[in-house]
Amino acid sequence: MNIGIFTDTYFPQVSGVATSIDTLRSQLEQKGHTVYIFTTTDPDVEKNVYERNVFRFASIPFISFTDRRIAVRGLFQSYQVAKELNLDIVHTQTEFSMGLIGKFVAKALKIPCVHTYHTMYEDYLHYVAKGKLLKPSHVRLMTCSFCEKMSGIVAPSERVLETLTRYGIKEPITVIPTGVDLTRFKVASENNVRKHYGIAEDAPLLLTLSRLAFEKDIDRMVASFPAIKAKVSKVKLLIVGDGPAKESLQDQVKELGLTEDIIFTGEVDNTQVSEFYHAADLFVSTSVSESQGLTYIEALAAGTKVVSSKSPYTAELLSDRAIGANFETLQEFVELVVEYLTKPAKYQDPKPLQQKLKEISADEFGEKILQFYERSKEHYLELSQTTYSKEHS
């Protein structure tokens, strides 16, 4: 198949969506298909630099998310390119500019259009006019409008499925968690993360890795750290990433007198994140807004256990203490972290993790997406035939 992926977010931007798309592209190409990326321009990509099968369209920073882009041109150009490429299916990854262009292209070419719903927008409304302009009802209307007449929709988690069902989406929805290229995280490189940041080899190390946004609730983790420190000698926390909440978090750390114990690394290149997972004793997250949590499964792929806020997604992912655990209160969070750091031998059974890694592998992800494409093409043909019959009856 010739597959067109339409997205506002792609490398070199750092995000779970960009990583998910790159994983999907890699798997589809390994299975003999051709993938074309239709995306926005990026200031970190030089003009006239060749990117294999990537087409970029003029864009500007998105309101309130200046590190994200939105296309301002490219509707008919995208159609012309897609027609020449003889696309078989369009797969949109955004509900905004390139997503709308993707829907137009698919309709004009009379091919199926499918969509992956990545973002829980209700968790981000505070970014626009401090939450005074857009309401959850607006999100529902926007989502229903965009998803209308899609041949199929991918929900990366049960939480996303429940949300789309609550919105009243009628199009067929399939839950397919994004997979991870296990080979990328299996072996640590020779780079010594602990040495680079002055962390002793015997110091228990917690890691969190994400965009430093307020909805990630990292402040809850920082607030809980003194209680962990009181029970675990020499414990450190490595906060990897950058974003609008960084300054606020740094101020919080300073106020708590934890500048020697909590280390901010800034943004890390995607090719280096494996080193951080291997350096840590435990991956932690206090976010309650994750739709799929790619960093969780990356940590597991590196053999690092995870402690996270409880959700339908994490409850299924962390179903065995030998893999990780969920918490509902910050007191539970502290207790679980202390338990894993002080009694690591208690949770060393490798079998549950081995089974889980099979389920979350990139190869499995690619196979499920291809099956989803085939079902979506069938659904598209059925609807087309039904529409034709009604028009000519």
Image (cartoon, rainbow, N blue to C red):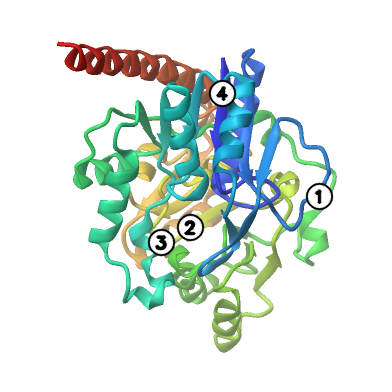
Q: Residues within 10 Å of mark 3 (few under 14, many from 20)?
A: many
For the residue marked with disc 1, what is the amino acid? Lys
Determine the secondary structure under disc 3. helix
Lower sequence index among marks 2 and 4: 4
| Residue identifier under label 1 | 47
Residues under numbered marks 1 and 3 in contact, where contact means CB atoms less than 8 Å apart: no
For the C terminus, the quadrant is: top left
Q: Is residue 208 visible?
A: no
Lower sequence index among marks 1 and 4: 4
Work out how far the residue at label 1 is from the one at label 3, CA to CA, in angstroms. 47 Å
Work out how far the residue at label 4 is from the one at label 3, CA to CA, in angstroms. 43 Å
In front: label 3 or label 2: 2
| Residue identifier under label 3 | 333
Q: Is residue 59 above or below residue 256?
A: above
Residue in the image at 50% along x and 52% along y = 340
| Residue identifier under label 4 | 3
For the N terminus, the quadrant is: top right
Residue in the image at 41% along x and 61% along y = 333
Q: Is residue 81 left or right of residue 331?
A: right
Q: Is residue 144 left or right of residue 298?
A: left
Determine the secondary structure under disc 1. loop
Lower sequence index among marks 4 and 3: 4
Lower sequence index among marks 2 and 1: 1
Residues under numbered marks 1 and 4 in contact, where contact means CB atoms less than 8 Å apart: no
Q: Quadrant of residue 129?
A: bottom left
For the residue marked with disc 2, what is the amino acid? Ser
Determine the secondary structure under disc 4. strand
For the residue marked with disc 4, what is the amino acid? Ile
In the rendered structure, find residue 285 and report the number of the disc placed on it: 2
Lower sequence index among marks 3 and 2: 2
Q: Is residue 68 left or right of residue 156?
A: right
Residues under numbered marks 3 and 2 in contact, where contact means CB atoms less than 8 Å apart: no
